Image (cartoon, grey):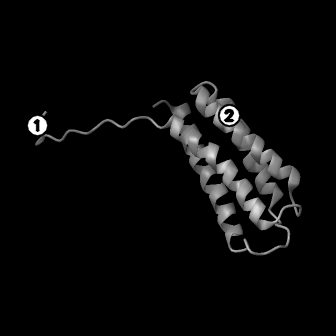
Amino acid sequence: MNSESRQLRQTLIFLRTSFEAVQHSIAGRLDDPLPCWLDTSLLSMLSRELYRCHEQAQLLSRDAAEQLWLAATRCELLLKQCPGVLSSTICYRQLAAILLPLNAAAACLALPTKKRRWPWQRR
């Protein structure tokens, strides 16, 4: 695995973890009918990273690049509706809609692992 793909995979892990954390922070308010107030500066930073990853993935995997584009556009849509327009439930679903292509992109970049043979195993 070259350094570009390794860096992209690490960034995808960071993005996935960040979106999951934001989604988890909303989970406690799913029954709350009041509007959700997300941190738009955080979402803007994550959106920029998604677009940057999309550019980087175009050189490595077309499928991953398409999934990252989808995640980035969904994040932009969420940003246009924030803050205070969406209920917590809808915001939670929007974040899930971002996580789906993000997970698919990570799966596209996952390399098959070689089965390790130990000295005492038969060949």
Q: Element at badge 1?
A: loop
Q: Residue at x 84, y 61 (%)?
A: 86
Q: Residue at x 80, y 62 (%)?
A: 38
Disc 2 marks which amino acid? Answer: His
Q: Which mark is residue 122?
A: 1
Residue 65 place in picture, x, y as percent? 64, 31
Marks 2 and 1, the one that precedes in the sequence: 2
Q: Say which of 54 and 96 sits in front.
A: 96
- Residue 84 x/y as whole percent: 88, 64
Mark 2 surroundings within 10 Å by alpha-carbon count, few (fewer than 14), some (14 through 19), many (20 or more): many
Who's the residue at 78% across and 75% down the image? 32
The quadrant where residue 119 appears: top left
Compared with residue 82, is residue 117 higher up or lower down, i.e. above or below? Answer: above
Q: Is residue 22 left or right of residue 43?
A: left
Mark 2 = which residue?
A: 54
Residue 5 position in % (x across, y down): 53, 33
> As displayed, is residue 89 above or below residue 62?
below
The answer to which quarter of the image holds residue 123 is: top left
Kind of residue at disc 1: Arg
Image quadrant in which the N terminus is located: top left
For the point 36% across and 37% down, the residue is 113
